[in-house]
Image (cartoon, helix red, strand yellow):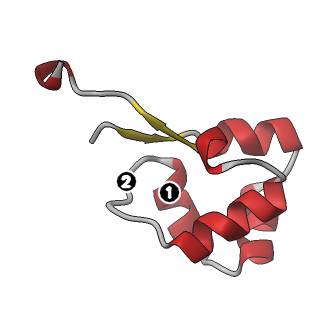
Amino acid sequence: MPIIVNLDVMMAKRKISSGELSERIEITPANLSILKNNKAKAIRFSTLEAICRELNCQPGDVLAYEPDEKEE
């Protein structure tokens, strides 16, 4: 999928652990891991909003579009 989740990069910049972030945004550590590892097929706007609020960032800091080679 051409949407890349750069959550781990922003977490490192903000020096926050997965456990702490999952607690703050009220999702399970397993679901946060799915997001971090680009395994998610979708993300709720409410979850994205919570991530941006806690990491003090914009959605574009967390999500990126990188077209597949076949789509270019």
Across and down, in percent, residue 43 comes to 46, 66
Q: CA distance from mark 1 to mark 2?
A: 6 Å
Against 72, residue 8 (above or below) is below
**Residue 20 in the image: x percent, y percent?**
82, 65
Q: Report which residue position mark 1 lands on.
A: 35
- Label 1: element kind: helix
- Quarter where residue 18 is shown: bottom right
| Residue 71 placement (x, y as % from top left) | 15, 25
Q: Are marks 1 and 2 in contact (CB under 8 Å)?
A: yes
Which residue does the image show at 70% across and 62% down from the upper left? 51
Residue visible at 60% across and 42% down? 60
In the picture, measured across the screen, residue 10 lies left or right of residue 32, that is right
Q: Which is nearer the eye, 30 or 38? A: 38
Q: Quadrant of residue 23?
A: bottom right
Count of picture labels: 2
Residue at position x 27%, y 42% from top?
Answer: 1
Q: Amino acid at mark 2?
A: Lys
